[in-house]
Amino acid sequence: MLIRKDFLSTFYKLLRSFSIKSRIFLSFLFLITLLLFSVNFLIINYQKNSLKNQYYEGLTHNLENFSLEVVDWLVFFDPLKLEEKVSSLKNLPGIVYVMVVDKNGRIVAHTNPSKLGQFIPVNDSTFKTWESLDNNGIKHFNRPVFKEDFSLGAVRIGVSEADINDFIEHSINTLKRYMLFISGVFLLVALVVAYFISITLTKPLNKLKKSIQKVQANKFEFCENEKLILCKDFYQCKDYRCPSYGKTRCWLNEDSKKWCKSVLKIECEDCFVYKYSCGDELGYVIESFNKMVADLRSYMEQLDKATKEKIKLEKYSAVSEMAMVVAHEIKNPLNSIKAACSYLKTNFKGKVLQEFLSIIDKETQRLNELITGFLTYARPVPLKLEKTQINNIIKEIINLVKPEFEEEGKQIELSLDPSIPEFYFDPYQLKQVMLNLLVNAGDATKKGDKISVATQREGGLVVISVKDTGEGIPEELLDKVFEPFFTTKVTGSGLGLACVEKIVREHGGKVSVFSKKGEGTEFKVFLPIRYEI
Ligand SMILES: Nc1ncnc2c1ncn2[C@@H]1O[C@H](COP(=O)(O)OP(=O)(O)OP(=O)(O)O)[C@@H](O)[C@H]1O
Ligand SMILES: [Mg+2]
């Protein structure tokens, strides 16, 4: 029992050391060989038994005829005929002897002539029908010879079992060769089939392994599944977040359109839609893996977003704290400097003094603006909503910057949508937004460039566009322009667009930027039209 357990565990360990491909291949080989061996064994044994039965049936039939034929030859005692018959029977395969005895037990015919005239012991069974096997493997068949009710003697035949087996063995040799050939061909075909089956099973597993390795290397790629038919072939859908991802049925075009629009707020053309997926168990494993990759991708995206948001918040809170300190520590001395400067300007004359006082005044003003920027961005300033006409606010700001732009040789164009109604927003903060965008446009343009401002109503939104034909923003910086402290200017604070984004966000809107290096930039502010507070 212990040895069998040991053997089994060694066999199991040995199997485990092979690859799945080899294991499948070897299992197939083992099963096919076992099957061939069993079938061959059964067929050959059946054939042997049936040949043996046929032989004995023929023999007993011959013996019955013999016992009838010898009747007349015994009555009229014809030793020649008897001899002739005995000799003909001797030619049958496996026959050891054939003999005929008369009613006294005297041998009147025998395949061995020296036995003629000898007597066999006579008893009850001598003139009866019987068959028996002796210790030498000779099977004896005895049949009585009768003429009406008179016993005339008996015929007896001895057959060697070993000789018969040899004879049968010899006769099925051709069959054996034939079966060996067929088995060989069958085994060869089975080997090829086993090889291909093992490949079909292990190929998807290998693909899955590669995909898992890619996931481990932070590459969230789907595992290719040949059995999967993508409806994207019909609908051009590409979004892995689509709810029909991995489902076993195809979404009808109309259904998927409605679903995507109502649930994901995107057009169906952006969705992945599957006609049917998976197929076999391996396909299901691959699809579960793909579902996991899709979820992982989405989680990673969310994590990325959250991390960016966190960094932004951290910067925001750092700025917040700093702004408070700066406001307290610098604003008051600045005001004193400004007051002192204007006192000196009015009460003391002198060209050099006036020039230096102008520099001090200008720089104090710039510092003041910087602090105001910090405060606008960092301090939570509550919105003072007023029902106002946005076009008028924009006109006011344009009038403010227009003279300077014209002086610098820049063209300013205004296109306002008269259908925009009055709605609630904070006019002061919106002026800040416009001023920041226009100052940036002014900084990015040179003589001969154009700055266009336009408003347009789009459903429940007002879109304000500030467009310039200036230097543009390199593509790799587009993501950064709204970050606080991001600036490419020597004297810039990098807070202008951060303030713009914050104010617009607080109004429930959003800002977007479109730019091409060397061609110009367009900022679009989307503001929701609010009719009530
Ligand atoms: N219209 C524009 N054309 C080209 N680049 C622009 C434009 N508007 C903004 N930028 C780029 O975005 C950066 C950030 O702008 P932002 O207004 O936040 O700060 P700033 O203008 O540099 O400084 P501040 O506004 O505080 O004086 C700018 O430094 C500039 O590189
Ligand atoms: Mg700016």
Image (cartoon, rainbow, N blue to C red):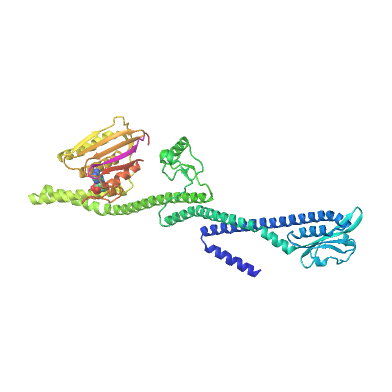
**Residue at 22%, 40% in the rendered image:** 469
Locate residue 65, reporting x and y percent: 81, 53
Locate residue 172, reporting x and y percent: 66, 57
In this view, which residue lies farthest toward the bottom?
A: 3
Q: In this picture, is 26 found above or below 136? A: above
**Residue at 34%, 41% in the rendered image:** 510
Q: Is residue 350 visible?
A: no
Q: In this picture, is 14 found above or below 179? A: below
Quadrant housing residue 132? bottom right
Q: In this picture, is 50 found above or below 269? A: below
Left or right: 361 as drawn, with respect to 140: left
In this view, which residue lies farthest toward the right?
A: 149
Locate residue 356, reporting x and y percent: 12, 51
> Viewer-proximal residue, 89 or 34?
89
**Residue at 58%, 67% in the rendered image:** 10
Q: Is residue 246 visible?
A: yes
Q: Is residue 138 magenta?
A: no
Left or right: 253 as drawn, with respect to 370: right
> Viewer-proximal residue, 300 or 154?
154
Magenta highlight: main SS:
strand
Left or right: 390 as drawn, with respect to 403: right
**Residue at 76%, 60% in the rendered image:** 90
> Viewer-proximal residue, 307 or 530?
307
Q: Which range of residues does the magenta coloring cover?
A: 517-530
In this view, which residue lies farthest toward the top?
A: 419
Quadrant housing residue 124? bottom right
> Viewer-proximal residue, 502 or 512?
512
Locate residue 507, reporting x and y percent: 34, 40
Q: What is the quadrant of the N terminus in the image? A: bottom right
